[in-house]
Amino acid sequence: MDRSLGVTMTVRIEGLGCTISHGPSGATLPTTPPKDNGGDGSSFSPTDLLGASLASCALSTMALQAGREGLAWGPARATVVKHMVGPPRRIGELTVRFEMPREVKPEQRARLEEIARGCPVARSLHPDVQVPMDFVYAS
């Protein structure tokens, strides 16, 4: 495994809230526990970030690969719904709905959907996490 591409992130906690710092850019992101787990829900929870990471990774990977393969692409978005289960408390399902660009031709759709389902975050999830993905194409 090539570790030369490692990215350093730092996490600092104050009270129940954490601040994540991205080493290369210096960007920061706050997290707090959700209300249903004793937090105040004032920001993304760590498990929320996993859902957002999945959608972001799938969209970015589709856009990158579309460019590499010369596939039609345009503006797209995704909505993620996270479902917790337990005990033990964990993510049981991340339901993702993609609103795909009108530029995507019908014959290219299966390829892009395969790319989304195989993005690095999706491949990193535990197999017990269900990840139904729905793709809706603008007309």
Image: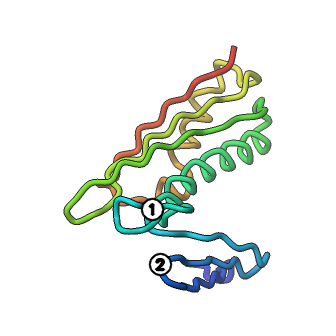
Residue sitting at the far top: 139
Task: Please state which of the two labelled residues, at mark 2 or mark 1, is closer to the viewer.
Answer: 2
Q: Position of residue 106 (x, y in %)?
A: 64, 18
Residue at 42% x, 48% y is 82
Residue at disc 1, secondary structure: helix
How crowded pointer 2 is (Cα within 10 Å; few <14, some 14-19, many 20+) is rated as few
Residue at 58% x, 83% y is 11
Q: Quadrant of residue 14?
A: bottom right
Q: What kind of colouring is applied to the model shown?
A: rainbow
Location of the N terminus by quadrant is bottom right
**Residue 59 circle label:** none
- Give the number of callouts: 2
Residue sitting at the far left: 87
**Residue 16 circle label:** 2
Relative to 97, does residue 1 appear above or below in the rendering? Answer: below
Relative to 69, does residue 123 appear above or below in the rendering? Answer: below
Q: Position of residue 16 (x, y in %)?
A: 47, 78
How crowded pointer 1 is (Cα within 10 Å; few <14, some 14-19, many 20+) is rated as some
Q: Position of residue 64 (x, y in %)?
A: 74, 48
Location of the C terminus by quadrant is top right
- Counting residues from the start of the chain, the first of labels 2 and 1 encountered is 2
Q: Left or right: 88 with respect to 134?
A: left
Q: Which residue is mark 1?
A: 47
Residue at 58% x, 34% y is 98
